[in-house]
Image (cartoon, helix red, strand yellow):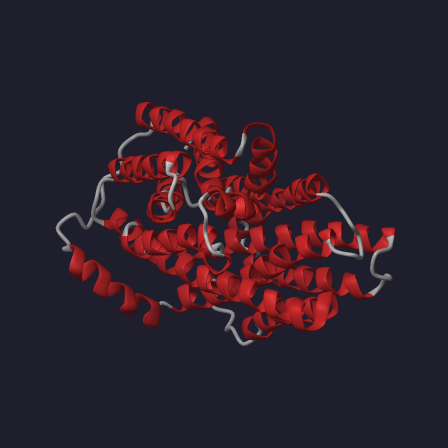
């Protein structure tokens, strides 16, 4: 695993992961352009995420029985066709189909993760996973401001044309550079592969615990990024869309925690690093109770919250994947699919809870709900036995 290959994989992950969130700041433009009723506008983003979730559960596990490079490129081609559909459709239903296909193909991100872990030695696996996770978080965080800026200059269709072009370029590079990785379970049937996943989740304690920890933390992260733009655009701050985009860009800096978390895991400090990540996320929300709403100090506190949350959930994601990828190599794709699917449920729950809390209690209640999620993760973590595996 050379440094150049690590950088390539991290860059590919960033480009692919961004597909999930390009539409988020464009919901109003897209729904109006396609004549969607207000109650259907949320499907602009939801169907992409649903496709991703289905891909994580039903495509990613194929990495345990199908040659990885072929599976990865097939998923990327599906995402490229989906993005081109998003760029050129003119009616609501075809848009929804293209959005679902884009999400399904974007699950390629989680095909790359175990692929990179496979070629990394035990001594460098955490650091490699950390670098790839940095790419993941950078892609997620940059997608919203990039989409906002491109749509401002060229219209929302151009966002998906640019995304498809970047995906095509990175797919060609991966095809030419990546070495093949043949699975050890190539004789296992797909039906048995899927059935085994329920057993794995029930019996592999490290997987189950790490998925639940990260589910709570990612829920807090999604809660924050669902509600903070509403706060910043609202009467307390009166910020513009461009200012909110800058705010999101600043939050990207938290992704620098990933390589450090990976190094800590490689050196046997996963338990301490996990506690630090969880406590950091808790303290991030408490900052919002110190200063008067709408003040400059409260805006600074929000920026710190964004960075701390990004750092905490990124670090814990690395620690979790480092732990599960240290298990049986023949199970990595299935374990990763289950891990990400559980996290996805936590994120969706956090977004829903955030919208509910903000509507019923404003930023005060939202911050308390956000605090409670990493607090719950920490309490559950403290019940873990110190067996050195997680």
| 16 lies above or below 56 | above
Quick check: can you spot residue 36? yes
Q: Is residue 347 left or right of residue 374?
A: left
Image location of residue 154, percent across then percent down = 55, 28
Residue shown at 60% from the left, 70% from the top: 356
148, 372: nearer the viewer: 148
Image location of residue 289, percent across then percent down = 80, 66
Residue shown at 62% from the left, 46% from the top: 257
Q: Is residue 14 left or right of residue 71?
A: right
Image location of residue 19, percent across then percent down = 45, 41
Quick check: can you spot residue 326? no
186, 352: nearer the viewer: 352
88, 250: nearer the viewer: 88
Q: Is residue 64 left or right of residue 345?
A: left
Residue shown at 70% from the left, 66% from the top: 367
Location of residue 169 by image quarter: top left
| 301 lies above or below 32 | below
Give the total number of marks visible in the rendering. Answer: 0
239, 319: nearer the viewer: 239
Image location of residue 201, percent across then percent down = 34, 68
Give the position of the N terminus as an image quadrant.
Answer: top left
């Amino acid at each position: 695993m050379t440094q150049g290959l690590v950088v390539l994989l991290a860059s590919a992950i960033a480009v692919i992961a961004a597909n999930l969130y390009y539409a988020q700041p464009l919901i109003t433009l897209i729904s109006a352009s396609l004549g969607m009723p207000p109650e259907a506008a949320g499907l602009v983003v939801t169907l992409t995420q649903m496709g991703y979730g289905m891909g994580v559960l039903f495509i990613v596990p194929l990495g345990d029985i199908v040659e990885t490079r072929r599976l990865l490129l097939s998923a990327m081609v599906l995402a490229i066709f989906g993005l081109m559909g998003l760029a050129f459709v003119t009616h609501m239903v075809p848009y929804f189909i293209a959005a679902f296909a884009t999400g399904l193909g974007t699950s390629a991100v989680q095909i790359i993760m175990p692929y990179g872990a496979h070629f990394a030695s035990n001594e460098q696996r955490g650091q490699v996973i950390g670098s790839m996770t940095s790419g993941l978080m950078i892609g997620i965080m940059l997608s919203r401001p990039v989409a906002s800026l491109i749509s401002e200059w060229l219209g929302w269709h151009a966002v998906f044309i640019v995304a498809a072009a970047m995906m095509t370029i990175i797919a060609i590079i991966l095809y030419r550079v990546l070495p093949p990785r043949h699975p050890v379970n190539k004789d296992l049937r797909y039906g048995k592969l899927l059935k085994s996943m329920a057993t794995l989740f029930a019996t592999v304690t490290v997987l189950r615990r790490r998925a639940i920890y990260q589910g709570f933390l990612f829920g807090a992260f999604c809660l924050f990024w669902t509600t903070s733009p509403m706060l910043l655009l609202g009467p307390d701050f009166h910020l513009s869309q461009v200012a909110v985009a800058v705010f999101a860009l600043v939050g990207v800096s938290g992704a620098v925690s990933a390589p450090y978390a990976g190094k800590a895991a490689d050196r046997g400090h996963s338990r301490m690093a996990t506690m630090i990540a969880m406590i950091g996320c808790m303290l991030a929300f408490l900052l919002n109770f110190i200063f008067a709403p709408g003040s400059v100090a409260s805006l600074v506190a929000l920026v710190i919250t964004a960075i701390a949350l990004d750092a905490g959930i990124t670090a814990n994601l690395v620690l979790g994947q480092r732990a599960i990828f240290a298990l049986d190599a023949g199970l990595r794709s299935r374990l990763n699919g289950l891990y990400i699917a559980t996290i996805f449920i936590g994120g969706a729950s956090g977004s829903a809870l955030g919208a509910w809390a903000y509507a019923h209690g404003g930023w005060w209640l939202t911050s308390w709900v956000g605090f409670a999620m990493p607090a719950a993760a920490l309490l559950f973590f403290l019940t873990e036995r110190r067996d050195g595996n997680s």
